[in-house]
Amino acid sequence: MLKEYLRIDKIEGPLIFLKGINEAKYGEIIEISVEGQRRLGKVIKIDAHMVVAQVFEGTSGMSTVNSSVRFTGQPLTIGLSKDILGRMFNGVGEPIDGGGPIFASQRYNINSRPINPVARQYPRNFIETGISTIDTLFTLIRGQKLPIFSGNGLTHKELAAQIVSQAKIASESEQKFAVCFVAIGITKDDGAYFVERFEESGTINNVVMFMNYADDPVTERLSIPKCALTAAEYLAFEADMHILVVMTDMTSYCEALREIASAKEEVPSRKGYPGYLYSDLAFIYERAGMLKTKNGSITFLPILTMPNDDITHPIPDLTGYITEGQIVLSRELSNKDFNPPINVMPSLSRLMKDGIGEGFTREDHPDLANQLFSSYSKVLDIRSLAQIIGEADLSDIDKHYMTFGKRFEEEFVSQGFSTRRTIEESLNLGWELLGELPPEALDRLNDELIRKYYRRK
């Protein structure tokens, strides 16, 4: 029989402290009764004399004498079935869309382990986002972890909605594809925006949404990524679906982690974040991938805002060590109303070389991507030179590069948040822009590809 404790020793922020507990287990769920109301919490620290638990619904209205605590001995679990598609859940996996409960024959522990490297299958093939810059230059490979580094005030919200609305598997269309969308610490207006965009695009029935709002308890921000990834694992590895997880904003998760660590009086590390921030992020990111024994896959696209646009900040810095590339948004391009404002030069996808080309996209894709990178890099050098000597004194070839760079940003990078391009359309547009340059400038392309696709302006 489970014991019920009628007194809490201390309450501090979202945490409660209890003494004299002998049977507590790390990570187990507790039930808290507050004047007839039931709340849930989770044990997050155990030492010789004290048990610390975080309360999911917050400690507002609780005191040390008006609450009772019961230890369940079980971790946090959620019920899952294929009926979760088209539904919306909160940070602890409870439906919040008014559609009723999920009837499931089994409940799943949200604290699943990262995928064992030995069991991983190397990512192949790609997911088409409909965005030329991503599909052509930083191709998203099935099973990859590819974060988006943004800044406060940039249009990552619109980019996230565009990717969820447009993403699909370009080949093997008979395979099942769905999106798991996770929003952490967003406003109610942003939540309504996402739902409206998904409804307008007709994809909402193929999306499972997990929403944590800014006025929700901070502790829910620590559980919502795990709930969402547990749902993705169920759909991918039990229902044999290919799942794209789009999660915004990981910075809100890390801020919640820092707040809880501070309340536990842990010794802070860089910028006040706990020393285990790296392992905590890795625990989340490494749940994405492909298994040798399963047909499905989980592709992870986390979005995070860099404080003060600092890419060396602990959150983007540690994320870059764990994931396979990054897509960086540019404030300069955003100020020019180029959307999505993707900064080409610092962005990369480390796995794209094995998921593009003949048999995946098109035979010219790898060389075309290299040529676009090389040409745009020269454009930036020429622009720096033009600021010194003036644009009128540039050579003829430099002026061709300037024209190419202008069109590349205005037509290729900036396609808007409602325009969808297939991979064929994006590659053809890339060749059209290279037509601004003379053939001798195409040093990353072989003669066969130039004869087949190149057309001089």
Image (tube, rainbow, N blue to C red):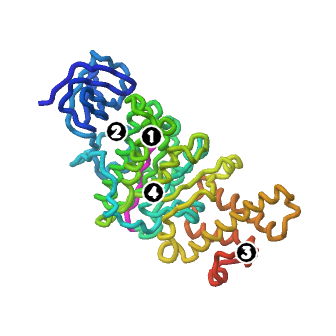
Residue marked by disc 4: 145
Task: Point out the tag, 2 or 4, that comes first from the N-terminus.
Answer: 2
Disc number at residue 185?
none
Mark 3 is on which residue type? Answer: Ala
In the picture provided, is 236 more to the left or to the right than 348? left
Q: Are marks 3 and 4 in contact (CB under 8 Å)?
A: no
Residue 180: in magenta span: yes
Q: Nearer the viewer, residue 212 or 41?
A: 41
Using the image, determine if residue 220 lies above or below residue 407. Answer: above
Task: Point out the tag, 4 or 1, that comes first from the N-terminus.
Answer: 4
Residue marked by disc 2: 92
The residues colored magenta run: 174-184
Q: Counting other residues with Cα less than 10 Å from the Cα at mark 2, is it few (<14), some (14-19), or many (20 or more)? A: many
| Closer to viewer: mark 2 or mark 1 | 1
**In 3D space, how far apart are the residues under numbered discs 4 and 1 (Cα atoms)?**
17 Å
Label 3, secondary structure: give it.
helix
**In 3D space, how far apart are the residues under numbered discs 3 and 2 (Cα atoms)?**
56 Å
**In 3D space, how far apart are the residues under numbered discs 2 and 4 (Cα atoms)?**
24 Å
Residue marked by disc 3: 441
Which residue does the image show at 82% across and 59% down from the upper left? Answer: 386
